[in-house]
Amino acid sequence: MIYFMAHMGYFMAHYITSSHKDRSVLQAYRLACARMSTDELLKTLIVLNYTYPYHQSIGFYMDLVGGYEAQEVQKLGKFKPIEHDFYLDYKMTKPMYSEKWRVYYPRDLV
């Protein structure tokens, strides 16, 4: 289970290089909504000890998709301090910005 959650978290948070893939990530979050365990995902992030703030992009996508319980999304926001802005994609023109998650994302994602 941890192996699956690690790869799911990696895919969902890091496989972002074009708008098409952004939409694929959104679809993955929609499909995972009923099956995903936020607690297991956070345990996996702790074990893997990533420097990259995956919890920010995961929380952003969970918020964007909707369907996730508010307390589950809040766990991501409290997991580690949200200290840095970052981009979900490369070479975006006029990206949108989520103040809550400090994430720049493609305008056509929403």
Image: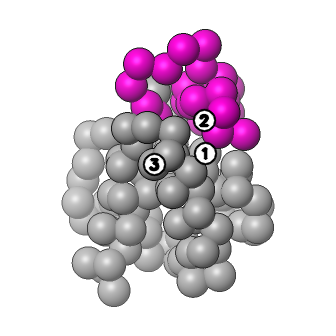
Compare residues 52 and 4 and report the one nearer the observer. Answer: 4
> Along the polypeptide, which appears first: circle 3 or circle 2?
3
Find the distance from the CA under tag 1 to the CA under tag 2. 6 Å
> Along the polypeptide, which appears first: circle 1 or circle 2?
1
- Marks 3 & 2, CB-CB < 8 Å contact: no
Find the distance from the CA under tag 1 to the CA under tag 3. 16 Å
Question: To which quarter of the image does residue 95 belong?
Answer: top right
At label 1, the amino acid type is Phe
Instruction: Give the extent of the magenta segment.
Output: 88-110
Secondary structure state at the residue bearing disc 1 = helix
Would you place residue 56 above or below residue 26 in this image?
above
Left or right: 78, with 90 as reference point: right
**Dot 1, crowdedness within 10 Å: few (<14), some or many (≥20)?**
many
Would you place residue 25 above or below residue 107 in this image?
below
Secondary structure state at the residue bearing disc 3 = helix
Residue at 31% across / 68% down in the picture? 6
Q: Mark 1 points at which residue?
A: 60
- Marks 1 & 2, CB-CB < 8 Å contact: yes
Q: Is the magenta stretch mostly helix, strand or loop?
A: loop
Q: Residue 97, image x and y in percent? A: 64, 23
Q: Which quadrant holds the C terminus? A: top right
Q: Mark 3 points at which residue?
A: 21
Left or right: 66, with 57 as reference point: right
Tag in front: 3 or 2: 3
Residue 76 can be seen, yes or no: no
Q: Mark 2 points at which residue?
A: 101
